[in-house]
Image (cartoon, rainbow, N blue to C red):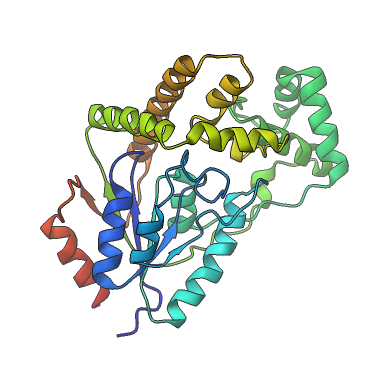
Amino acid sequence: MDHKSKIILIAGPTASGKSNFALKIAKKIKGEIINADSMQVYKQLRILTNRPTDKELKIVPHHLYGHINNQEYSVNHWINDVKQTLHNIYSRNKVPVFVGGTGFYVQALIEGLSEMPNISKKYKKEAEDLFYKKGPDICLDLLSKYYSEKIFPKDKQRLINRLAFCLEYNDIMENHYSEKTPVTSNPLVIQVVKPKRDLYELAETRFHKMIEEGALDEVKKLHESKKISKTLYKAHGLPELLACIRNKMSLEDAVYDGIHNTKRYIKRQFTWWNNQKFSNLNLRINYKKSFPKDSIENISIYLNK
């Protein structure tokens, strides 16, 4: 049977069991797994980002794990890598099984990604100088001339990009985005969920396990490289363990803060999913190491359409 254009996406919050579920699904249907986690792309942090083990990698082919060095890597880069990976998987007549919990990766895969208009280096630098030398309030005042609604500086990079575009083109960026083109028009989307309190307990247990397995040594090696990319620095637990290595925090406090911030991230993941209105969210399951019967039925129906 020709599986071209078929995509299974298994998504969910941290510690929900989605990776284990995806592995069992991929093995059962002879599929291949594609990473949809923005931190597991980095090769430096296998333990801290909970990448698949060597044993798991031998069960089915895995793609886009640990393939990026310590450098900037955006959702645009990921989508480009995904397209090439899909081409290769379809050429083998296999089914791609995406798994991850990074919201904007999931959204880009399902809804597509608008290409951001080009901004020249001159105006990007001008906007950065305004932000860092004058402060975000000055930037917001300048942007208010272009935007009728208030813009909050939650994401400084987005704020800088918007300001740079306004300075260069005397218009708002949103008027110049290209039309979204989804990677696939018909994915099977499965959301793996668990009660929030269970996820908090699992995340805490997992963090301690990562420390036991050598996450601190992994971070020490990264620290020795002197420079850490902005995107890699967002890895959960990395800022806290770096503070420990730099003698700014005890290991006990670093672990406590790392767990606390991971729990906060899980809470944000819940909020993000609750705010999404994906028309093609086919199934929501609570996975407990055994296959829910309806998930297998849904996958079989989808693949045989």
The residue under the point 43% across, 31% down is 211
Q: In this rendering, is residue 222 above or below 112?
A: above
Q: In this rendering, is residue 15 above or below 83?
A: above
Q: Residue furthest left?
A: 293
User: If the image is split into quadrants, where does the C terminus sit?
Assistant: bottom left
Q: Percent from the top left, x then y, of residue 73?
A: 63, 49
The residue under the point 40% across, 45% down is 101
Q: Residue furthest right?
A: 122
Q: In this rendering, is residue 113 above or below 271?
A: below
Q: Percent from the top left, x then y, of residue 113?
A: 55, 55
Quick check: 138 left or right of 281? right
Q: Percent from the top left, x then y, of residue 64?
A: 51, 59
Could you tell me if residue 302 is visible in this image?
A: yes
Looking at the rendered structure, the number of numbered marks drawn on it comes to 0
Q: Which residue occupies the foreground of this view, 197 or 250? A: 250
Quick check: 208 left or right of 181? left
Q: Percent from the top left, x then y, of residue 264?
A: 41, 25
Q: Quadrant of residue 190?
A: bottom left
User: If the image is split into quadrants, where does the N terminus sit?
Assistant: bottom left
The residue under the point 70% across, 23% down is 140
Q: Which residue occupies the foreground of this view, 169 or 71? A: 71
Quick check: 51 left or right of 194? right
Q: Which residue occupies the foreground of this view, 178 or 237? A: 237
Could you tell me if residue 186 is visible in this image?
A: no
